[in-house]
Image (tube, grey):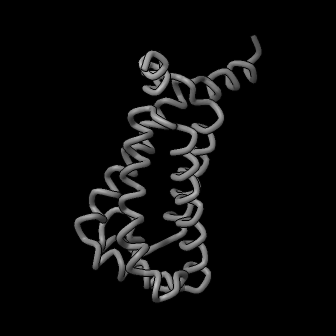
Amino acid sequence: MSALTKIHATLTHPYLALILRLYIAGLFIYAGMLKINYTAEFAETIASYRMVPYWGVNLMAVTMPWIELISGILLMCGIRVRSAIVVTGSLLVMFSVGIAANLIWKAPIDCGCFHTLDDPISWKTLVRDLMWVAMAVHVYCYDRILHLERKLDWIVKEI
């Protein structure tokens, strides 16, 4: 077995996808829980990105943390994993675009990723978010173990 084959086998292994899925799930559960408690401060962070119309800031500040929390829980439990990872991946792409745009505009804003008063955005923040996007793509492509919905499928068929 060549070295490239071993590397490919390791990178596409379902256990790696499971680890990445649980990592992303933990990130989104943690981020969602923190933002739910501080909706007003999160609304200010969203407004500082200047990418959402003023009438949509409060709606986004209220709904986005719940979307993060619910999709994180679904990923953690292995329920509708592909749908949940598409939602989380889409959010990560949206966050990356917002960070990149504000870095280009040289806007001195906080990230707002985990705390309402975070560190200012930087290129390091963008690279971190892009790495999370790559992890989400990996989970979408290779995750196929420990899905709770498959374990409960026989119960649903009996009912």
Q: Position of residue 42 (x, y in %)?
A: 34, 74
Q: Position of residue 46 (x, y in %)?
A: 43, 78
Q: Quadrant of residue 22?
A: top left
Q: Vertical placement of 81 versus 148: above or below?
A: below
Position of the N terminus, as image quadrant, is top right
Q: Vertical placement of 17 versus 128: above or below?
A: above
Q: Position of residue 60 (x, y in %)?
A: 43, 73
Closer to us: 21 or 124: 21
Residue occupying image coordinates x 48% and y 37%: 21
Q: Residue furthest front?
A: 159
Q: Vertical placement of 149 versus 63: above or below?
A: above
Q: Report whether 140 appears left or right of 30.
A: right
Residue occupying image coordinates x 42% and y 65%: 64
Q: Quadrant of residue 142?
A: top right
- Number of marks present in the image shown: 0
Closer to us: 112 or 69: 69
Position of the C terminus, as image quadrant, is top left
Q: Vertical placement of 39 versus 18: above or below?
A: below
Residue occupying image coordinates x 29% and y 78%: 41
Q: Position of residue 27 (x, y in %)?
A: 39, 49
Q: Report whether 151 appears left or right of 62.
A: right
Q: Report whether 19 appears left or right of 10.
A: left
Q: Residue furthest left?
A: 37
Q: Residue furthest bottom?
A: 54
Residue occupying image coordinates x 45% and y 22%: 156
